[in-house]
Image (cartoon, helix red, strand yellow):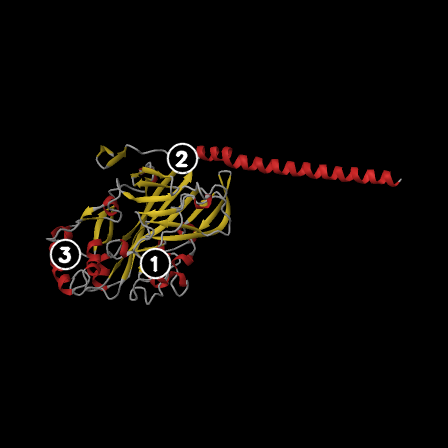
């Protein structure tokens, strides 16, 4: 599957050019005052550093299987990321001060005070604290945690925000090919063999729509585009925002609305995404999603970057956040005839909850809960110039030609009708005379 070129560099044998450049850019929240926070429970001062860019999703789908009876196709989408130094502000060895992921998760995973006391001895012995220094590569793709490495139980000691990633697969997708019903093209039938996720209750747990790479054709502005994202462990939707010209191709821009992450009081449809009452302030907190159930119980929260469209109390304990719609919103540019997504920007922020814990010295001085931003990412893809030209020639151009032919035929019909009426009137006039 992989060939090592040089230390820290991986090349994939089935790395293919798809005609769409897909990049994932990361901005890391570098903590500037770790000691003040640990001792005095002060506001967390962060400095955003980035972008650090990786090329992703150039791997060919694997295990493609057609099922003529159900009109579906199954496949695996392997994951791969290659660092792009020319599009980055630094290297993978750049160091950041970030929340200690293992220490922060300990109270959530082990709420029992006796167990926390035992863990505290390992934390102290490893000289771990609430914050730690890690390189970009370690933070994203994994490192051996010194605290976990001392625990005398069979647990995973390697952790990272996206660990494991390279040479993994998201899961088996089965999607409809539309042969029996064109309105079902690309819609997900099952994911990992299931029609639901087992993370949420009621309809929130359903896998709806497509994977956002394409949608059933003949997209109208009034349509709500539903899609599933394993990154946020839920199905979500986008609504029409504007008409855009993309490299000579007319597209509809669909945007992720703030309503999607609203509280149940603002949007009753979101009631089943509220899974607890304390951190969510009795389900009134908005703009953040607790995805701990799909992260093995770890206190991971997803939001838009800089808590865009989030409750003011989310950003209150964090200094230097500045959300804005242009940089931090998510959108899809969809060609309406084919339903293909020709450009997209997926923006999301990874946060982690850290709570006071009297039995863990590294956390005992905290006076309140923090939802600490770790990083935010911008995954973008745009149809390449060559593919755009091909699309214009093969699709847009022919549709325009068809429209021109339609106008010509209509004009000819009108002319013939008018000529017929003139001839008819002339004949009637001659008969009268």
Residue 11 horizontal/vertical position (percent): 27, 34
- Checking the image for residue 123, the label placed there is 3
The first of marks 3 and 1 along the sequence is: 3
In this figure, which residue is indicated by the disc labeled 2? Answer: 19
Quarter assignment of residue 88: top left
Q: Is residue 100 visible?
A: no
Q: CA distance from mark 2 to mark 3?
A: 49 Å
The first of marks 2 and 3 along the sequence is: 2
Image quadrant in which the N terminus is located: top left
- Checking the image for residue 367, the label placed there is none
Which numbered disc, 2 or 3, marks the residue closer to the eye?
2
Residue 22 horizontal/vertical position (percent): 37, 40
The residue that appears at 23% across and 48% down in the rendered structure is 160
Residues marked 3 and 1 touching at CB (< 8 Å)? no
Residues marked 2 and 3 touching at CB (< 8 Å)? no
Q: Is residue 423 visible?
A: yes
- SS for tag 3? helix
Q: CA distance from mark 3 to mark 1?
A: 29 Å
Residue 295 horizontal/vertical position (percent): 26, 53
- SS for tag 1? strand
- SS for tag 2? loop
Q: Looking at this view, is 92 or 247 the one in front?
A: 247
Q: Is residue 99 above or below residue 312?
A: above
In this figure, which residue is indicated by the disc labeled 1? Answer: 288
- Classed neighbour count for the residue bearing mark 3: other residues with Cα under 10 Å, few (<14), some (14–19), many (≥20): many
Q: Looking at this view, is 305 or 256 the one in front?
A: 256
Q: Is residue 307 above or below residue 72?
A: below
Image quadrant in which the C terminus is located: top right
């Amino acid at each position: 599957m992989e060939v090592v070129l040089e230390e820290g560099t991986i090349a994939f044998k089935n790395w293919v050019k798809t005609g769409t450049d897909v990049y994932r850019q990361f901005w890391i929240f570098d903590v500037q005052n770790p000691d003040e926070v640990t001792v005095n429970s002060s506001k967390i001062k962060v400095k955003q550093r980035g972008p650090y860019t990786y090329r992703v999703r150039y791997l060919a789908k694997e295990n493609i299987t057609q099922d003529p009876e159900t009109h579906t196709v199954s496949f695996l989408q392997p994951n791969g990321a290659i660092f792009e130094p020319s599009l980055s502000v630094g290297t993978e060895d750049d160091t950041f001060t970030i929340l200690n992921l293992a220490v922060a998760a300990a109270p959530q995973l082990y709420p029992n005070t006796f167990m926390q006391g035992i863990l505290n001895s390992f934390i102290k012995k490893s000289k771990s604290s609430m914050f730690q220094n890690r390189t970009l590569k370690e933070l994203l793709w994994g490192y051996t945690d010194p605290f976990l490495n001392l625990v005398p139980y069979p647990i995973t000691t390697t952790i990272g925000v996206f660990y494991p990633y390279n040479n993994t697969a998201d899961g088996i997708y089965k999607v409809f090919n539309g042969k029996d019903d064109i309105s079902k093209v690309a819609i997900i039938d099952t994911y990992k063999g299931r029609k639901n996720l087992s993370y949420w209750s009621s309809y929130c747990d359903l896998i709806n729509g497509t994977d956002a790479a394409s949608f059933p054709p003949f997209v109208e502005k009034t349509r709500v585009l539903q899609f599933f994202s394993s990154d946020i462990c839920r199905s979500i939707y986008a609504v029409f925002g504007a008409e855009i010209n993309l490299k000579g191709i007319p597209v509809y821009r669909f945007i992720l609305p703030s309503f999607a992450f609203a509280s149940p009081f603002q949007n009753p449809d979101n009631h089943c995404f509220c899974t607890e009452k304390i951190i969510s302030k009795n389900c009134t907190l908005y703009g953040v999603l607790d995805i701990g159930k799909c992260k093995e119980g770890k206190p991971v929260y997803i939001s838009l970057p800089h808590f865009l469209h989030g409750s003011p109390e989310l950003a209150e304990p964090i200094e230097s956040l500045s959300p804005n719609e242009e940089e931090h919103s998510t959108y899809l540019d969809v060609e309406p005839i084919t339903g293909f997504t020709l450009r997209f920007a997926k923006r999301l922020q990874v946060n982690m909850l850290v709570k006071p814990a009297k039995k863990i010295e590294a956390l005992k001085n905290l006076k309140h809960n923090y939802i600490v931003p770790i990083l935010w990412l911008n995954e973008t893809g745009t149809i390449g110039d060559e593919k755009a030209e091909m699309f214009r020639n093969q699709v847009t151009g022919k549709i325009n030609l068809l429209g021109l032919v339609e106008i010509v035929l209509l004009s000819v019909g009108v002319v013939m009708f008018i000529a017929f009426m003139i001839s008819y009137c002339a004949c009637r006039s001659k008969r009268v005379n």
